[in-house]
Image: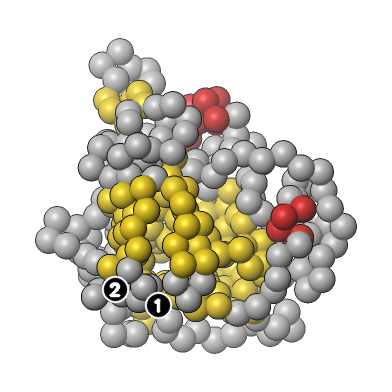
Amino acid sequence: MRYRAIGVMLSVILQAPAAGHAAEQAPPVPACQGCDCAGTVPTLAVVAALPSRDWKEPFTARGALKAQGEYAGSERWQFESFSLNMLQPSPTAAIQVEPARRALVIQDPAPGLKQNPAAPPPWSPAAGSISVTGWVNVKFADVVVRGTVNAAGGSAGSRSRQGLLARWDRHHSYYWFYVDFSSGQATIGKQQPGTATAVPLPGSEVAIPGFQKTAAYQLELEVVGPKLKGRIFDRKGKLLVETAEIEDATPHACGISGVNAELSLNAPFAPLSASFAGVSAAAVPAARVTGGGPP
C-alpha cells in the first residue's frame, strides 16, 4: 500500500502507542473476575477493576464535546481525539450526539496530515485528528460488539476508517473491525505493543459488495477465546459479507469495547469524518461461537 510507511513513521514518533490512545504505564495485575487479564502485557489495573455487564447505547441524549471528554447517554462514554501536531488532542475536532438521527457524529474540518514536498516521509503532521476513540468502561473477555458506522452519511461521504473496538486494555492492545471508506474494504485489525497502528489479521480482509462511501453499514465483531469473526449488514439488516473465522495465535485476554475512527492509509490527507449509531456490547459464552445477526 502506497502509504504503509505512515505506520512505520508513527511507531517512531509515538514510540508504539496506538494512535488516539494515550499511553499509560502500569504493571500487570492479577486475573480479574470474569475476565482473565493475567496474560495481557501490559494490563492496566483500571481495566481489571471494571465491571462486566452487557450494555447498549442508542445515542438519544443530546450532547456535544470538544476534542475529548464525556457523554452521558444510556452509558457513560469517554472520548479522545489525537493530533500528531503536538502529540495531544486535536483542537479542531468536534464530537456531537444528534438525537434526531440517533447518531454520534465526529467531524474534524482540519486534516491530520499534510503532504510533505521534501519526501520522504510523504507527509508531515497537521493540526487535525488522525483518530478519535470512544469507549465504555465495562470489560469483557468473550464479546460481541455491534454498531452502525457512517450512520449520518452525507452527500460527500466519508474517506476515513470507522469501526468497533473489542478487548482494548486502555494501553496498546485491542481488536478493531472497521470499514475503510476510501477502499470499500473491511478488516479486523490487531493493535499490540510494537505496532503503531492496528495490523490486519491475515485472512480477515473482505470487499463490501456494492460499496458506497455515503452508505451506512451495520457491523458485528465477535471475539470468543482466540477466534474472531466480523460481519457486515446493510441498513435493513441484510448480511452483505462476513470474514473468515480468524484464530489469533497470541490473543488479547480481555478489555473494554467502543468505537474508533482513523484516517485511511488510502486517503491520509482527507480530514477525519465518522458517525456511529446503535452501539452495543454483550458477553458471549466461551463454549460457543454464535451465528450472526444484525445489530
Residue at (78% x, 73% y) in the render: 34
Q: Is residue 21 above or below residue 63?
A: above
Q: Is residue 168 above or below residue 290?
A: above
Count of number-bearing discs = 2
Residue at (84% x, 53% y) in the render: 29
The residue under label 2 is which amino acid type? Pro
Which numbered disc covers residue 99? 2
Q: Is residue 176 above or below residue 56?
A: above
> How does the figure colour the protein chain or chains?
secondary structure
User: What percent of the width, then of the height, locates residue 133?
Assistant: 47, 53
- The 10 Å Cα crowd at callout 2, few under 14, some 14 to 19, many 20 or more, is some
* Mark 1, residue position: 58
Residue at (50% x, 62% y) in the render: 77
Side of 200 where 179 appears, left or right: left
The residue under label 1 is which amino acid type? Pro
Q: Of helix, strand and loop, which one carries label 2?
A: loop
Quarter holding residue 18: top right
Side of 41 where 134 appears, left or right: left
User: What percent of the width, then of the height, locates residue 171?
Assistant: 64, 46
